[in-house]
Amino acid sequence: MAWIVKNSGTHKIARRPEPWVTAEMQNQYRIELLPKYETSQGALMPILHDVQHTYGWIPEQAMEEIASFLNIDPSRVLDTVTFYEEFHTHPTGKCIIGVCQSIACEACGHQAVLDHLRSKLGIEPHETTDDGKFTLLALECLGSCDTAPCALFNDDRHDNLSITDVDRLIDEHSA
């Protein structure tokens, strides 16, 4: 697999006039999170989770604001966000579908489930449908090897998935 190098020297961050990490959020972090950690960097993950929970994703401007608030280098925030699959750097669909790719799910047919979702939704993993309803992810182990193949539909895990099950779940989340 080849590394895709981005020219970070000329990269422009999309900005909006109001901050993503509001004064109210910062105050809450200052009171509830920072005292729990020896260093401010210890609060990074909980803050990232909160920002993503609030907006559904973590914009680059928010990453800079978090870095400034925690007094850490912005690259540490970016490295953390891009390392963990659970964080999103682009807006996501209302329903996030994560198909497990573990060895057990692979042996039990996860590829057929993933291929069916790709075809039915018309997107590849880590893409969102044009109508904003679905985001498709290919995830590592979901910890349900005895019920493979499995997938998350938002935060609900569905086990022993068949193509019929997938179609039913898509229909349920299309409304």
Image: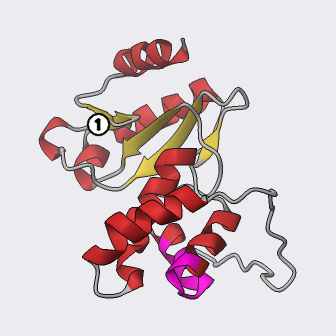
Q: Using the rendered image of the protein, determine whether residue 109 is visible from the camera's viewpoint.
A: yes
Q: Tell me the residue at 66%/59% (across/down).
A: 59
Using residue 98 as the reference point, say whether residue 145 is left or right of it. left
Instruction: Answer above or below: position of 26 versus 72.
Output: above
Q: Tell me the residue at 65%/52% (across/down).
A: 90
Q: How is the image coloured?
A: secondary structure
Disc 1 residue type?
A: Cys
Q: Quadrant of the C terminus?
A: top right
Q: Which residue is mark 1?
A: 150
What is the quadrant of residue 110 in the picture? top left
Residue stretch in magenta? 69-80
Q: Quadrant of the N terminus?
A: bottom right
Q: Using the rendered image of the protein, determine whether residue 86 is visible from the camera's viewpoint.
A: no
In the rendered image, residue 100 lying in the magenta stretch gets the answer no
Using residue 117 as the reference point, say whether residue 131 is left or right of it. right
Q: Nearer the viewer, residue 113 or 159?
A: 159
Residue 41 x/y as whole percent: 41, 82
Instruction: Answer above or below: position of 41 versus 61.
Output: below
Q: Tell me the residue at 58%/88% (across/down).
A: 73
Residue 30 x/y as whole percent: 42, 70
Secondary-structure class at tag 1? loop
In the rendered image, residue 77 lying in the magenta stretch gets the answer yes
Q: Nearer the viewer, residue 36 or 50?
A: 36
Q: Tell me the residue at 23%/29% (across/down).
A: 160
